[in-house]
Amino acid sequence: MKKTSFFLILILIAAFLVRFLGFWVASFYIDEATLLHRARQVMTGEEIFNPHFVESGIAYGMIVSYIQALFMKLVYLFGQWRYGWDSINDVYLILKLTARFVSVLAGTATVYFTYLTAKKLFNTKVGLFSALVLAFSFNHVAQSKYALVDIFISLFLSIAFYFSTVMLMNKKNFLRAYVLGGVFSALAFAVKYNFPVFVPILAAHSLSVWRQVGEKKWFFFLNWWRKEIILLPFVSLALFAIVNPYLLINPTNYFWQLKTILTSSWNFPYGAKDLDNIPNIVWYFNY
């Protein structure tokens, strides 16, 4: 085994352990409970498409609920086969912890893609150092212990950032990297509707065009509008609709719900979570 692979594996194991240990300890706070209820509805088939923005009070896309429901369903089917489970209510705590465990895996995967991106941009040592820093980053570790959407934004955005880097630095795989970078940017947007997630791919596109025009910088704005960048919003919108099918089923109600919840959120008294009020070192000792 190469020394680089050895250190990377150690970092990933450490990243997994600090996220895994104690992920079952904290109580389920309101946003988490709301997301888990929606995942349960998807899992049971009670409500598969409607995000219920207004009733739930959160403007999150359905993709995280689908991911959580998939893993919860797999665990429940295994429990039925192996242990004879016959009621979701009796094992709901196990299913909720399954959703949290998915966040643990997503957080660990983010560390790996951070390594790949830094390695591509700089070198292997910088990649390992970047992965090591993120592996023990307090807020990232904390978010990885909860069944929330934020860690999935980090994961999809880190993958989009990686493919944006590949697009910028590898001409052979330009189109493939462009497509995948756009796909994961769209997935990150579909989680929580944050337009800045498209910044990495747009920045990589702009830098790629800037390098290609050479000394003829006045051609930059003309060359910027290439077919790939024109297709990006259409591909993103199509993928967004796929992972949020209620947009196609009932677009009028979907946009009414979204408008209502986003309008009301301007007056919402956002506050710090309990975990943000705990000093980092104390948090690590507690968990």
Image: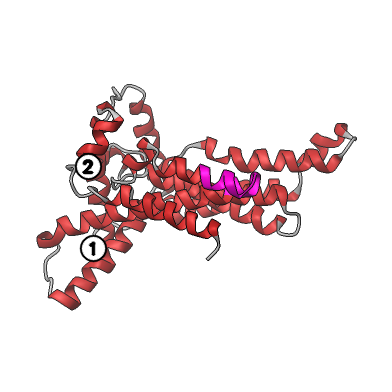
Q: Residues within 10 Å of mark 1 (few under 14, many from 20)?
A: few
Image quadrant where residue 29 sits: top left
Residue 167, above or below 136: below
Is residue 200 toward the left or the right of residue 246 in the image?
right
Question: Which x, y percent locates residue 157?
Answer: 51, 45
Q: Earlier in the sequence, mark 2 or mark 1?
A: 1
Report the Cα–Cα distance between label 2 and label 1.
33 Å
Amino acid on which disc 1 is placed: Thr
Out of 142 and 137, give the one closest to the viewer: 137
* Image spot of residue 250 (x, y percent): 40, 50
Residue 82 visible within the image:
yes
Segment tinted magenta in the rendering: 117-129
The local crowd at label 2, few if under 14, some if 14 to 19, many if 20 or more residues have their Cα within 10 Å, is: some
Q: Which residue lies at the image location 69% right of the left edge and 46% below the top edge?
A: 229
Residue that appears at 54% across and 58% down: 3
The kind of residue on which mark 2 rests is: Tyr
Q: Marks 1 and 2: in contact by CB < 8 Å? A: no
Q: Residue most toward the right?
A: 216
Q: Which residue is mark 1?
A: 44
Snapshot colouring = secondary structure
Of residues 139 and 261, the one nearer the viewer is 139
At horizontal 15% and vertical 58% (from top left) the residue drawn is 92
Please tell me which residue is depicted at 13% across the width and 71% down the height of the picture: 85
- At numbered mark 2, what does the secondary structure look like: helix, strand or loop? loop
Side of 259 where 204 appears, left or right:
right
Q: Which residue is mark 2?
A: 287
Mark 1 lies on a secondary structure that is helix
Where is residue 112 shown, x and y percent of the image?
A: 49, 52
Q: Is residue 68 magenta?
A: no
Percent x, y of residue 53:
32, 41
